[in-house]
Image (cartoon, grey):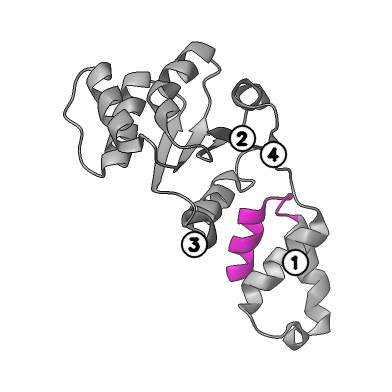
Amino acid sequence: YSVVPIVGPARVGKTSLAQHIYNDEAISSNFDIKMWVWVCQEFNVLELTRKLTEEATESPCDFASMNQMHRVITNQLNGKRFLLVLDDVWDESQDRWASLQVPLKCAAPGSKIIVTTRSTKVAKMMALKIHQLGYLSDTSCWSVCQDAALRGRDPSIIDDSLIPIGKLVAARCKGLPMAANAVGHV
């Protein structure tokens, strides 16, 4: 498998991008199993392995032992291509990352792990190539606001006197696509 880290500041759209990839039918059809695990700040390997077991089996996990969970995950993934999203990873421990990967090594070639993180150090620990998301320009924020406000209608319906106001509002979004989208919908 390969790891694809998506790195960027808070609310820049890392999780939204991962969700778009995860839910895209053209991409999904390339994988036998899809799993999504929200990691958060505390990287508890036992709890993450439990969540991974539940995602792989699509059922609750009652095992207390890491070895039992590894066997279940290995059985589920053996020879299959998987897509795993590890969302919001903060922990920089190489050892904990290595422990989480143990049952994933039996999967078919072409499997992918998408990692969303704010930390470049976390991303570089997981892969050589990282995908850095940054803030949008004011022009791009205006475009996102406009698209959200118009909801597919022709942009020519906007009164020209309102465009400078809209651009000022978009600039106050500080480059955050989620903020621009929310403002546009309002």
Task: Please report contact status of discs 2 and 1: CB closer than 8 Å, yes or no.
Answer: no
- For the stretch drawn in magenta, the main secondary structure is helix
Q: Residue at x 75, y 66 (%)?
A: 143
- Identify the secondary structure beneath mark 4: strand
Q: Position of residue 79 (x, y in %)?
A: 39, 37
Q: Check residue 143 in the rendering and tell me which mark sits there, or answer none.
A: 1
> Which of marks 1 and 4 precedes in the sequence?
4
Viewer-nearest of discs 2 and 1: 2
Report crowding for label 3: few under 14, some 14 to 19, many 20 or more residues within 10 A (C-alpha). few
Dots 4 and 3: beta carbons under 8 Å?
no
> CA–CA distance between discs 4 and 1?
23 Å
Seen from this angle, which residue lies furthest top? Answer: 95
Magenta region, residue range? 172-186
Residue under label 4: 131
Precedes in sequence: disc 4 or disc 3? 3
Question: Tag on residue 25?
Answer: 3
Q: Is residue 183 magenta?
A: yes
**Numbered circle sitting on residue 5:** 2
Q: Give the amino acid at mark 3.
A: Glu
Q: Residue at x 78, y 78 (%)?
A: 162
State the residue in front, 39 or 173.
39
